[in-house]
Amino acid sequence: MAHEFSIAEAKDHLSEVVRLAEEEGTVELTRRGKSVAVVVSAREFRRLCYSSSKPFAFLEEFRNSHDADHHGLEPGDLDGVRDQHPGRVVRR
């Protein structure tokens, strides 16, 4: 976590804490130097709490949010990248 505030600092700078959570990710809150809470954006909270129970939903979400054309990948560019070795021999 890149941002950390004591609870007293967070009370004095609440709008900044919320802005950081919305724009840059999580904000850790500490009491006497020990982590006690984390502030996250509403979007991240919903993602964590209400994630789909559908298998591979994360993959679908990733594919929807990352356009392969944008990264210059063409069909077949990654063919042969994976090691085809079957792995180790298991002895019984």
Image (cartoon, rainbow, N blue to C red):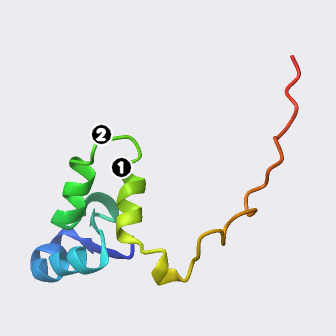
In depth, the one of 45 and 38 nearer the eye is 45
Q: Residue at x 42, y 75 (%)?
A: 67
User: Is residue 37 left or right of 88 when viewed as pictured?
Assistant: left
- The crowd level at tag 2 (other Cα within 10 Å; few <14, some 14-19, many 20+) is few
Q: Amino acid at mark 1?
A: Ala
How far across and down, in percent of the image, does residue 25 sit?
30, 72
Cα–Cα gap, marks 1 and 2 = 8 Å
How far across and down, in percent of the image, does residue 4 sit?
31, 73
Q: Amino acid at mark 2?
A: Ser
Q: Which mark is residue 53?
A: 2
Please say if 11 is above or below 49: below
Q: Quadrant of residue 32?
A: bottom left
User: Is residue 29 left or right of 66 when viewed as pictured?
Assistant: left
Q: Which mark is residue 12?
A: none
Q: Which mark is residue 57?
A: 1
Mark 2, secondary structure of its residue: loop
- The crowd level at tag 1 (other Cα within 10 Å; few <14, some 14-19, many 20+) is few
Mark 1, secondary structure of its residue: helix
Q: Residue at x 42, y 55 (%)?
A: 59
User: Is residue 12 left or right of 74 when viewed as pictured?
Assistant: left
Q: Residue at x 41, y 72 (%)?
A: 66
Q: Residue at x 38, y 56 (%)?
A: 60
How far across and down, in percent of the image, does residue 14 sit?
11, 77
In depth, the one of 39 and 71 nearer the eye is 71
Please say if 29 is above or below 53: below
How far across and down, in percent of the image, does residue 78 sit?
67, 67
User: Is residue 48 left or right of 70 when viewed as pictured?
Assistant: left
Q: Quadrant of the N terminus?
A: bottom left
Q: Is the Cβ of the residue at disc 1 closer than 8 Å to that at disc 2?
A: yes
